[in-house]
Image (spheres, helix red, strand yellow):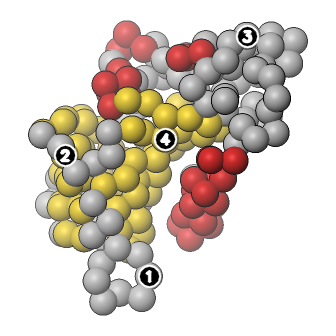
Amino acid sequence: MTHLPIRARHLFALAALIALPYAGLAQSAPKTPAATPPQQKVQLMFVQTADQLKADDKTLRLVNVGQQTLYFSDRPVRVAGHLTMPAYLDEWKASEGPDNFSNDPPNATLSVYQPGQPENTLTVVEISHPVIEGKDMVYRYKLIEGKMPKAGGATAVFIDWIGVGGGVGPGFHGVGVGARGVGWR
């Protein structure tokens, strides 16, 4: 995903977000070990939404962030669902394995609505050190591409994948091998 131009990454992420409610419609039965071999790796991407964005040169604040973080994967194993904020924050802990977000901070694309602008502002950053402050999520960030708005309206954050080895992958909250997980209904 990081090899695509920003607009293509943004459109891919939006399409995936729109498809989330339909992800399980074709499923009539939960996956079984035979249907999802253990050697297949699941790499999950995450989406967070907020009512507003406030940022300075080092931190970004997702004001009134949604309390569920959406996740989805791409082929060959398609998984979709949501995590509570505490479960999402667990992905930043060293106990989640060598691929945890704290050891390998993810890139993220912010899509920020700014009144008077014809299109959302897109900014690519590396995020780290998440902190919950009341109803807000605060990240430290390093700018990779674009310009960070100081403030904005409705915001979506599309967070790059983490794979097997971190806490996310086969068996995470029942996702993947042999269990009906949060992404399968």
Tell me, for residue 70, which label it has, or none.
Answer: 4
Q: Secondary structure at mark 2?
A: strand
Mark toward the start of the polypeptide (2 vs 1) = 1
Q: In 3D space, how far apart are the residues under numbered discs 4 and 3 (Cα atoms)?
A: 21 Å
User: Alpha-carbon neighbours of circle 4 within 10 Å: few (<14), some, or many (≥20)?
Assistant: many
Q: Secondary structure at mark 3?
A: loop
Residue behind mark 2: 136
Looking at the image, residue 73 sits to the left or right of residue 91; the answer is: right
Question: Given this view, does label 2 or label 1 mark the residue nearer the observer?
Answer: 2
Amino acid carrying label 1: it is: Glu
Question: Given this view, does label 4 or label 1 mark the residue nearer the observer?
Answer: 4
Looking at the image, residue 99 sits to the left or right of residue 138; the answer is: right
Amino acid carrying label 3: it is: Gly
Mark toward the start of the polypeptide (2 vs 4) = 4
Please name the residue shown 66% across and 53% down the image: 19
Mark toward the start of the polypeptide (2 vs 3) = 2
Residue behind mark 1: 119
Q: In 3D space, how far apart are the residues under numbered discs 2 and 1 (Cα atoms)?
A: 25 Å
Tell me residue 123's x, y (percent).
38, 65
Determine if residue 171 is in view: yes
Q: Secondary structure at mark 4?
A: strand
Indicate whether 68 appears above or below 117. above
Q: In 3D space, how far apart are the residues under numbered discs 1 and 3 (Cα atoms)?
A: 43 Å
Please name the residue shown 40% across and 58% down the image: 156
Please name the residue shown 18% across and 36% down the image: 132
